[in-house]
Amino acid sequence: MSEHLIIRLNSQSSDPIQWIVWSPENKEVIVSGELSSSETIESLTQYSVQRSVSVLLPSSDILLREVSIPEGAARQFPSMLPFIIEDDLAQDVDDLHIVILKKDSKTAQVAVVEHQKMERWVALLTDAGIQTKRFIPDVLSLPSHQDGVAMVELNQQWLLRYGEYQGAIAEPEWLPMLLDGLVKHAVQTADGIVVQEEKEEQEESDEVDDAPCYALHSYSPCSVEIENTKHVQETPELIMQLLAKGALTSRVNLLSGKYRPQSSWRKHWRIWQKVILAFGLVMVAFVAQHVSEVQKLEQHSLALRAESERIFRDVFPGKRKIPTMSYLKSQMKNEESRLQGGSGGDDLLAWMSELTPYLIKVPQVKLQSLKFDGKRDELRLQASASDFPYFEQLTSELNTKFDVEQGQLNKNQGQVFGAIIIRRK
């Protein structure tokens, strides 16, 4: 994204909101303006599309300060910080959002802002459909000068930056007092870091150097006169342009902890979560049904195999081992061919299909064996019954469709045995 939208929010909903669309590549202002209040912020939504958005917060609502880290407590410092600064705050630390901007072995630069205000700013942008990943105190978007303070007037307030992570906002009537305090602090700091050799030289010569001159880098006209300062009138430019340049190079971000922006995939996940969950449940049900059907088919297959093996052992009493199903099929096929009298067709099956209704009519006749002669197209049955009339009844039934020749009947131990030869008419 070559263009950036920078918005400076307000402390009160009725305060104006400044904004600018800045192109760092072309170093030009695309468009800028001022909203009368936060109620019209939705008009900026169109400018946020396909652009990176940075938000400047009014430093009048933010406390920027340096905190000393207790010796040996560097690791525990983040958890100790609320209790360290608690005595210096007028509010309960639970109501405050505390951010560590920078930390070294001895000190830490922190920013403190009320949760209530953070939530209002976040909700304001969210309701307007403006997505941002950065909240920056506006004073930390000013240029940083090592020899003094950077200052600019905006909406009858002076924004000052007097350190890498230090700054404040002052009303015009309070500006001289604030600058005087900054100068005195700078003088004390400078005196405190003079090396011992310089002190000895000063004592020998009995000469005292003039106090260091504190520079006031003003980007707006300033008539305030402070002792031991020098005015540096910087090149005037559009104030939001000045802040936009600093915002894009700043590494400060107050959107941390519970305010940390969610990644895009999490937002999409929330949108599609219910759909994916429903799809997952459908897939689970489908897989469960499929597994159940497969198990039923497997059980049916095992039952069919067991029945096939039982029939095989009935047909071949002398063969007990069935190494493979292909072996079973080949043996049954050979036996079928043998019973068909060497015929390669389905004659035997056709015969049995035609005979079955007649055999059912005379259930007293029990079939003992059969032999099919394909060449003669005849079927020889060996049967038994409890009495002779049953053979006559079966022969009579078969005569309606076949040529039947009844062989000799013998009675043995209360059973009548005999042969029946059947040919097609």
Image: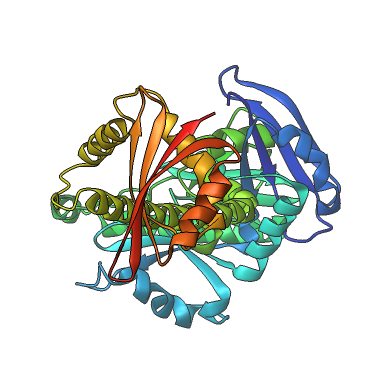
Position of residue 146 in the picture relative to residue 282 (left or right): left
> Looking at the image, is 216 positioned above or below residue 290?
above
Q: Residue at x 57, y 48 (%)?
A: 397
Residue nearest the viewer, comparing 411 with 17: 411
Q: Is residue 225 visible?
A: no
Residue nearest the viewer, comparing 113 with 189: 113
Q: Is residue 331 visible?
A: yes
Q: Position of residue 170 (x, y in %)?
A: 65, 58
Q: Position of residue 296 (x, y in %)?
A: 44, 57
> Looking at the image, is 264 positioned above or below residue 73?
above
Position of residue 5 in the picture relative to residue 12 (left or right): left
Q: Residue at x 80, y 59 (%)?
A: 13
Residue nearest the viewer, comparing 354 with 139: 354
Q: How many marks?
A: 0
Q: Position of residue 145 (x, y in %)?
A: 45, 40
Position of residue 345 in the picture relative to residue 7 (left or right): left
Q: Residue at x 55, y 82 (%)?
A: 92
Quadrant location of the C terminus in the rendered image: top right
Q: Position of residue 341 (x, y in %)?
A: 30, 29
Q: Quadrant of residue 231?
A: top right
Quadrant location of the N terminus in the rendered image: top right
Position of residue 329 in the picture relative to residue 367 (left or right): left
Q: Residue at x 56, y 41 (%)?
A: 399
Residue furthest to the top: 26
Residue nearest the viewer, comparing 18 with 191: 18
Q: Quadrant of residue 384?
A: bottom left
Identify the colour scheme used: rainbow
